[in-house]
Image: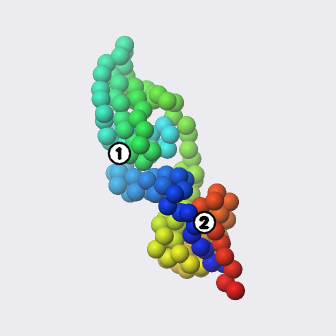
Amino acid sequence: MSILLEKILQNPILIYLQKFYSAMIAIKIDVNLPKCPRCGIEVTKIVKEWDYSIFHVKRFNCEACDKTFGAYFKKDKLSHTIPKTLSKSDEEIRVLVEKARIIKYLKRHDKATTDEIAQALNLPVVDVLNMLIELESEGIIQSIDDA
Ligand SMILES: [Zn+2]
């Protein structure tokens, strides 16, 4: 199976994934920082701070999804976020990151085979194949026959 990229730059899902990926590698892991309620990555960029009732509120800007959210602290401990944090499992995040790596690779090697991708990214072929099938059903890539 070979992959041909089509409309890849205009695809909003791709843009989201790329941002997500670059943010994942750019931001250092710190357990004391709140995670973006939308995409689950840790954020560092405080836009504004104020006190509200018993809470100290910090408004963060998530660089991955480019949206802000409020983190409510009670006695220096994170209480909750607004909007509410959606739980994204580690596995879901791993798949998103791996997909972003595949897309990044395909942007530079637009007729790569499944084997080539697996080798270049050091991933199991079966995982790559499954993610390629998902990416194709999401309309991000298109597969073509070798013939
Ligand atoms: Zn986010």
Q: Earlier in the sequence, mark 2 or mark 1?
A: 1
According to the picture, the residue beneath numbered tag 1 turns out to be 30
Question: x%, y% of residue 17?
Answer: 50, 55
Residue at the far top in the pictured view: 53
Q: Does the rendering let one see residue 59?
A: yes
Residue 33, quarter of picture: top left
Question: x%, y% of residue 113?
Answer: 60, 79
Name the front one of labels 2 and 1.
2
The amino acid type of the residue labelled 1 equals Asp
The amino acid type of the residue labelled 2 equals Ile
Q: Name which residue lies at 47% across and 28% down.
A: 82
According to the picture, the residue beneath numbered tag 2 turns out to be 141
Does 84 appear above or below 26? above
Does 81 appear above or below 20? above
- Which of the image's four quarters has the N terminus? bottom right
Which element is circle 1 on? loop
Is residue 58 found left or right of 36 in the rendered image? left
Q: CA distance from mark 2 to mark 1?
A: 34 Å
Relative to the observer, which residue lies in front, 115 or 108? 108
Does 7 appear above or below 20? below
